[in-house]
Image: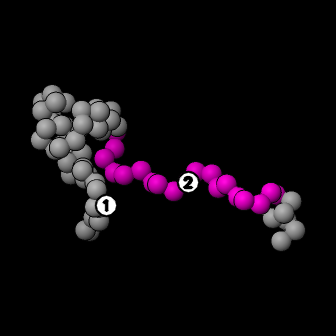
Amino acid sequence: MKQNYHVNANTNSHSRAIIRCANTSNIDLARRFGVSTKTIAKWRGRDFVKDKTSRPKTMHYALSETERELI
């Protein structure tokens, strides 16, 4: 299955897997993939390589609960 990435995405699941398994330093990996050392440290600390969902965890409504019940 083909993966679609955001235009500004610097890493994908393949490069993240390489980052997690690599024995080189964070600085070397950051130079190789063109990202910050903070990004490398983030992906090394995770136990997955897929993107997290970007949907909100809670829905904030403009109407109060009583206003929603009236509608």
Q: Give the residue number, with chain letter if any, for mark 1.
A: 6
Q: Give the residue number, with chain letter if any, for mark 2.
A: 56
Q: Quadrant of the C terminus?
A: bottom right
Mark 2 belongs to which amino acid? Answer: Pro
Q: Residue at x 58, y 51 (%)?
A: 57
Q: Residue at x 16, y 44 (%)?
A: 33
Q: Residue furthest bottom?
A: 71
Circle 1 Cα neighbour tier, 10 Å, few/some/many (<14 / 14–19 / ≥20)? few
Magenta residue span:
47-65
The picture places residue 63, in percent across and down from the top left corner, at 77, 60
Q: Residue at x 25, y 68 (%)?
A: 2
Q: Quadrant of the N terminus?
A: bottom left
Question: Is 32 left, or right, of 13 in this rendering?
Answer: left
Mark 1 belongs to which amino acid? Answer: His
The picture places residue 11, in percent across and down from the top left corner, at 24, 50
Q: Residue at x 34, y 51 (%)?
A: 50
Q: Secondary structure at mark 2?
A: loop
Residue 65, quarter of picture = bottom right
Residue 9, quarter of picture = bottom left
Question: Is 26 left, or right, of 65 in this rendering?
Answer: left
Residue 62, quarter of picture = bottom right
Q: Which mark is residue 52?
A: none
In three-dimensional space, the C-alpha distance between marks 2 and 1, rounded to whole angstroms, equals 18 Å
Can residue 23 be spotted in the picture?
no
